[in-house]
Amino acid sequence: MAIQREIGEPLRNRIHWMAGTSCGGIMASSMSVGIDLSDALRIYIVIRKRIFGGNTQMFPKHSSHGIETCLQEVMGPKTPMAKCTAHKLVVTTAKVTLAPSQLILFRSYAPRIDPKEFEQLGYFNPNKILLWKTIRCTS
């Protein structure tokens, strides 16, 4: 938000690519669907108890229901990654069931390759990947 104050306009007006992991992925996704950074901060503050449930244990365990419900409310339950057209969005995560872990990139755009090659080359079709699920994978 400090950068926005400095440039005098929303940050999303000055960038073409956005990428992030975890909280950065949530913020990049929010900006890519037109949510202003200050609004995203307000959303975080309002929904944090719904997500984390006020758990104060040293190593808390949280139900995934809270974050999944909130993500669907904010991003839409059926919004595909491909709807993020104002910017190229990349949300990163890792497949940790493999050793070594494998980087997974969810993209809002499709590479210019034959759709049959998508899966073969490790791409996900942005028309079939839901935005809220992408964010959930990185959170």
Image (cartoon, rainbow, N blue to C red):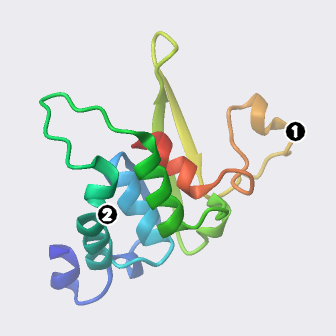
- The type of residue carrying mark 1 is Lys
Q: Is residue 76 above or below residue 107?
A: below
Q: Quadrant of the N terminus?
A: bottom left
User: Is 112 placed left or right of 62 in the picture?
Assistant: right
Disc ID at residue 116: 1
- The residue under the point 47% across, 68% down is 74
Disc ID at residue 47: 2
Residue 136: x and y in percent read 48, 46
- The residue under the point 28% across, 64% down is 44
Q: Is residue 101 above or below residue 84?
A: above
- In the image, which is nearer the foreground, mark 2 or mark 1? 2
Residue 37: x and y in percent read 30, 74
- The type of residue carrying mark 2 is Ile
Which class describes the residues within 10 Å of circle 2: few (<14), some (14-19), or many (20+)? some
Q: Is residue 21 above or below residue 70?
A: above
Secondary-structure class at tag 1:
loop
Q: Quadrant of the C terminus?
A: top left
- The residue under the point 48% across, 51% down is 68
User: Is 87 placed left or right of 61 in the picture?
Assistant: right
Residue 86: x and y in percent read 55, 75
Residue 79: x and y in percent read 64, 65
